[in-house]
Image (cartoon, helix red, strand yellow):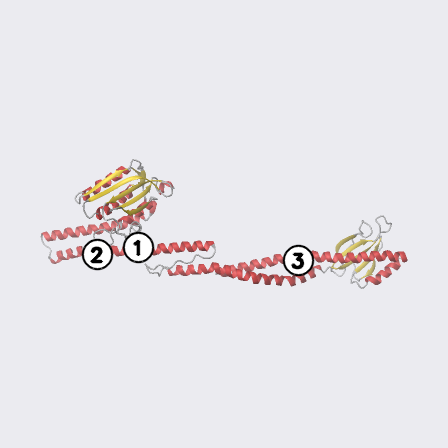
Amino acid sequence: MPRSLGGRLALTLTVTALAVLLAVGGALFVVLRELHRDAAFGRLHAVGTTLLAQLGTRVVQGSVQDALDSLREQVGELSLVVLFVAGDRDPVLLAGNARPAEALPPLPVGGRGTFDDATLRFDDGGSWTVTVVAATAPAALVPRGFVLAAPDQGGAATLGDLARTIPLVALVVLVVGGPLAWVLARSTTGPLRRLAAATASIPGAGHGAEAPPLPEEGPSEVRELTGRFNAMTGELVRTRRAETELLANLRHDLRTPLTVIGGFAQALVDGTAQGEAAVRAARAIADETARLEGLVDELGAIARAGEGAASLRPEELRPADVLTAAATRFAPRAQPAGIALETEVAPDAPTFAADRLAVDRIVGNLLENALRAQAGPGRVLVAARAATLPDGRRAVALVVSDDGPGFAPGVVAQSVNERSFRVDPARTGPGSGLGLAIVRELARAHGGDATAENLAPRGARVSVVLPVVPATLAE
């Protein structure tokens, strides 16, 4: 069996063509064999009819023996075996040398001029076509007739016909099927070769390099495979680009606390910071260490969220309880900054099943981003209302909106789709930019999703839609 797909297609088509030729040859052999047999019997019938007519004429003019002697001279040139049969007496040989090795068939009972055909084995070992023709009426006391036989050459003639026909059929199959087979093999193997080459180049592709999509050609299965490959490579490129941006942001976020920790630690070591200054240095080191721990926790939350629904522990939650707990937790941060933190639960907001810790993290991250985005006094609203997922399932929407500067132009769609997103990409303040990525991962693990939008004239809103029954319980 060839290893390549093209070789296997060629082998399959070749075997199929040979099978078709054999089937056609077999069918033609049967048909032509019968035609040749019918033609042989027809020739014997014609000779038999002539002999009957001449026998009648000779008998009228003289004896039966004289008639047979006259017929013997005429049929000697026909390359046939001709026997005259009269009752139970031995047949009289009129022409030919071969004799039947089997019993002759009886004379037909239909009377003068009726025929009966058979195939018999003769003493030369060959198969002969035999025709028996009656020369007397059915009521004759001594039934007479002729037996005419000729070598059965139908098989040889049929093989000769096939020897002339099959090469022509094979040539037509080659001329017509060859190009079709080549086009079929190329239409299948060409896209697969491009797909294999593109697949081999993926590991070495740069993180930001996005190759043009492969053309979707060939059979429908190959086009579907190519389309999925293009989608996969596009997602891979976007993921690599997001990872690159994430690493860049992490380097930025790590550099500041490390610089602070290193500077104050060196001041403590060389004695520059003493007394109250040493206390401030130690407190700064502790604060920056806490920031690093928070960053590590956020990275761990993304990894756990990536495990999907399997890591969730759903329980029944009331939207009012979730929002009240979150507002209580963030009120000490909002009040000193002059930010009014409000909650709003719509009457149609349904009770839902979800992982309590995951929901607390979702609402907490949204409030964290909203409070951080406020440049001064303002208002942050966290609300809950009924919603419907695209597939028609009932859901609850948890919405956090603020009246801050809103999302930067061009990054609203990116805000919940990239792990490295920042509300303001140019901002150099605290925050790793992972909060909204964690929100998205946790929402999708429940079977929901997250969206972000700017508000007019200013402000932003992030909505998380969670199904009333999460994916783990709906299955």
Relative side of 8 to 237, left or right = right
Residue 255: mark in rendering? 2
Viewport quadrant of the C terminus? top left
Circle 2 — which element? helix
Element type at marker 1? helix
Q: Name the N-terminal-most of marks 1 and 3.
A: 3
What residue is at 13 percent from the left and 53 percent from the top?
Answer: 281
Q: Closer to the camera: disc 1 or disc 2?
A: 1
- Horizontally, residue 447 falls left or right of residue 220, namely left
Q: Residue sitting at 83 percent across and 60 percent down?
A: 94
Name the residue carrying label 1: 242
| 213, above or below 348, in the image | below
Task: Residue at the far right: name it.
Answer: 62
Q: Are marks 1 and 3 in contact (CB under 8 Å)?
A: no
Q: Is residue 248 visible?
A: yes
Image x and y of residue 446, in percent:
33, 44
> What type is the residue that disc 3 sits on?
Phe
In the orientation shown, which residue stands out farthest toward the top? Answer: 347
| Residue position marked by numbered label 3 in the rendering | 29
Q: Earlier in the sequence, mark 1 or mark 2?
A: 1
Q: For mark 3, give the secondary structure.
A: helix
Q: Amino acid at mark 1?
A: Ala
Q: Position of residue 202 (x, y in %)?
A: 37, 59
Q: Are marks 1 and 2 in contact (CB under 8 Å)?
A: no
